[in-house]
Image: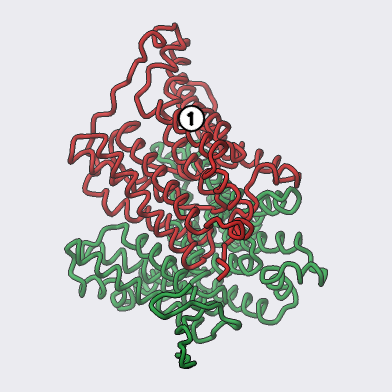
Amino acid sequence: MSFLGYTVLPRTQTSALALLAVPLVTIVLSIVTMVIMFSLLGADPGVVLYSFFIEPLASSYNLGELLIKASPLILIAQGLAIGFRARVWNIGAEGQLIIGAICASLLPIFWPDSQSAWMLPGMILIGALAGMAWAGIAAYLKASFNASEIIVTLMLTEIAKQVLYYLLTGPLRDPSGYNFPQSVMFPDAGLYPTFGGDGVRANLSVLITLVVTVGCWIFVTRSFAAFRLMVGGVASDAARYAGFSQRRAIWMSLLIGGAAAGLAGVGEIAGPIGKLQPILSPGYGYAAIIVAFLGGLHPVGIFFAGLFMALVYVGGDIALVSAGVPASAPVVFQGLLLIFYLASYFFVRHEVRRVPQATGLRGAA
Amino acid sequence: MMDALIFVLAGAFATATPLLFAALGELVVEKSGVLNLSVEGMMALSAAIAFMATLQSGSHLVGFVAGAASGALLSAVFAVLVLGFMANQVAAGLAVGILGLGLSALFGRAFEGATLMGLNKVAIPLLSDIPVLGRILFTQDIVVYGGIAATGLVAWFLYRTKAGLTLRVIGENPDTAHALGMRPVGVRFLAILFGGAMAGLAGAYASTVLTPLWSQDMIAGRGWIAVALVVFGTWRPGRVAVGAYLFGAVSLLGLALQAMGIGIPAQFMTCLPYVLTIVVLVAISADKVRVRLNAPAALGESYRPAS
C-alpha cells in the first residue's frame, strides 16, 4: 500500500510525541474548519474566535459558567474512561445522568421545607447509587447474557428520557406549576453552595469533580485493579491467562461510569437548574465520550479536555449573541473534534515512511 | 372503534417506513461487519436537506434524491474514518452522528415552521376495494410500497446474489475473505454508502411526507430505533420489516389510546420498542450458537488490510 512514494506502516511502539500532538492537532483542525464554515455563513471569523475562546475567560461570571459546564463533562468522562480502557463501551451516560437526577430529586421534592444539612449528602449518595443501578442493568445483561452493552446502554438512555417525561407529567409535577412539566423548586438545603462572588454560579460540583479527578488519577496510576482493567482491554487473552475476570471488569467499568454520571446529574439539578425539568443536560453524556477520547483516556488529559469542551459550550452561547453564530455551532464543533481526533489518532499507531528507493536511502518519518 | 383501529393499522405502515428504510440500510452495513451508530445524525441531516430541496424545487423526487445524497455523503466521512484511519467504529459512529445533528440544525433553522404538501396516497386498483384490508394495506403512498419492495430486494441481494454472499463473508471474517481474493475495504465502503443513502431516504420521508414540516428535533430518536430494529430483527430483512411495522403500530397506538382517554401513559408505549429490543438482544446473546446464527461474527471489529 503506497502512495506517491510514501507508505503507511504500523508502529512497533506507540509514539509518545504523536500521543501528545494528537489533541493539539485535533483542536487546531477543528477550529480552522469551523472558522471557514462560519465565514462562509457570513459571520466575522475574528468575532467568532474571540467569542468562542477569549470571552468565556474574560469575566468572573463567564469563568463560573465555564466551571459548572466543565464539571459534569470531566466527571462523566473520568468514569467512562475507566471503562473505555477496559473496552467496555458505556455510551449511555446521558441516561445514567437522568436517572441519577430523578432519584436524587425525590428528597427535595418530598421534603420541600426541609433545612436539614443531610439533604445534600443524601442527594449525592442517592444520585450516584441510582446512576450505578441504571448502568448496572447493562452490566448484568452483559456479564450474565453477553448482551452488547453498547445497544443496552443506548436503549436505556431512551427509556430514561421517557421515565423523566412520565414523572414530570404526573407524579413529580409541581401541583401549582400551571401544568408545566417541571417539579417544585428545590429548597436551599437541596442546592449546592456557590462560590466566586455575586451572581457567579460556580458551585460545589466543581470541587467534587476535582476530588474525583485526583481519585481517578490515583486509581489509574497506582492501583492493581485499574491495571487489571487495562490489561483486559489491551490484551484480553493475556488477562484471561493471568486470571483477571472479564465479568468483574464489566461490572466495575459500568458501575463506576454510572456512579459518575449519576453524580453529574445531581450537580445539574442541585446546581444551575434547581428543579427537575424535561431537559437536564445539553447532551453532557455524549459530549463526555468525546472528552474522554480527546483526553487520551487519562485523568489529567480528561481534565483539560473537559475544560476545553466547556469553553466550546460557553463560547457557543456567547457567539450566538455576538457573532450571530447558530445555536447548533457547539454541536458541529463537537462532532468535528471527535472526527479529527479519530483520524489523527491513526498516526499514534502508524507512521508514514518513504518507500525505500533503489539507492537504499530511507526518509525519516 | 373499528375506524380507530383501521386508522392505527393504516398509519402504522407510514410511521414505520422511515424506520424500515434506515434499518434496512443499517442491516446491510452490519452484515458487512461494520457497526454504524450515526443513523440518527444521518437521518437528521438528510431530513433537513430533503426538506430544503423539496421546498425549493417543488418536487418530492428531488427531495428524496438530495436526502439520499446527503446521507451517503455523511456516511462517507464515517467510512473514511473506520476504513481509512481504522478508527474505533463506536466512537466514529457517535462522532459522525453528532456532526449530522449539528449540521441539520445549522441548515434547517432557516426553514423552521415552513410546511410542504405530503404525497398523495395511491390506491391500488381492485385490491384497495377489499373491505378493511384495502384501506389498511393498499391505500398508501408510493414510498410505503417502496419500503416493502426494498425489504424484498435487500433479502434477495443478501441471500440470492454472489455480491451478497461476498458481503456476508466479509462480515463474518474479513481476513478469510481477503485471502479468497475479495476486497473487504471496498465492499464495506459501498455497504456504508448504501446505509447512508437509505438513512437519507428515511430522513427525507420523515420530513417531506410523514410530517411535512421542519422542526429541529424532528427525528427524535428514530435513528436509534432503526439501530435497535436490526438487533430486534436478528439481522434478517423480513423480521426487520415486521419489527418496523410493529414499532410503527405501537407508537401510533400510544397516540390513539391517549386520544381515547385510556390510561396508559404515552411514554410507556414510546419505551416499548427499546424494552423489546433489550429483551430480544438478551434472548439471542445468551446462547453462543444463536449468536453465531444471527449476528455477523466480525461486527464492530476494525479490519487491517494485510499488505
Question: Subunit of mark 1?
Answer: B
Q: Can residue B274 be seen from the camera position used here?
A: yes
Q: Residue at x 23, y 42 (%)?
A: B53
Q: Residue at x 64, y 46 (%)?
A: B295
Q: Is residue A152 above or below residue B271?
A: below
**Chain that is coloured red in the picture:** B
Q: Can residue A104 be seen from the camera position used here?
A: no
Q: Is residue A144 above or below residue A168?
A: below
Q: Nearer the viewer, residue B108 or A316?
A: B108
User: Residue A222 sits in which quadrant?
Assistant: bottom right
Q: Residue at x 66, y 77 (%)?
A: A220
Give the residue number, with chain letter if any, for mark 1: B248
On the image, the x and y values in percent for residue A285 come to 50, 59
In the picture, measured across the screen, residue B116 lies left or right of residue B2, that is: left
**Chain A is shown in which shade?**
green
Q: Identify the amino acid type marked 1.
A: Gly
On the image, the x and y values in percent for residue A170 come to 51, 36
Q: Nearer the viewer, residue B66 or A303?
A: B66
On the image, the x and y values in percent for residue B122 come to 33, 19
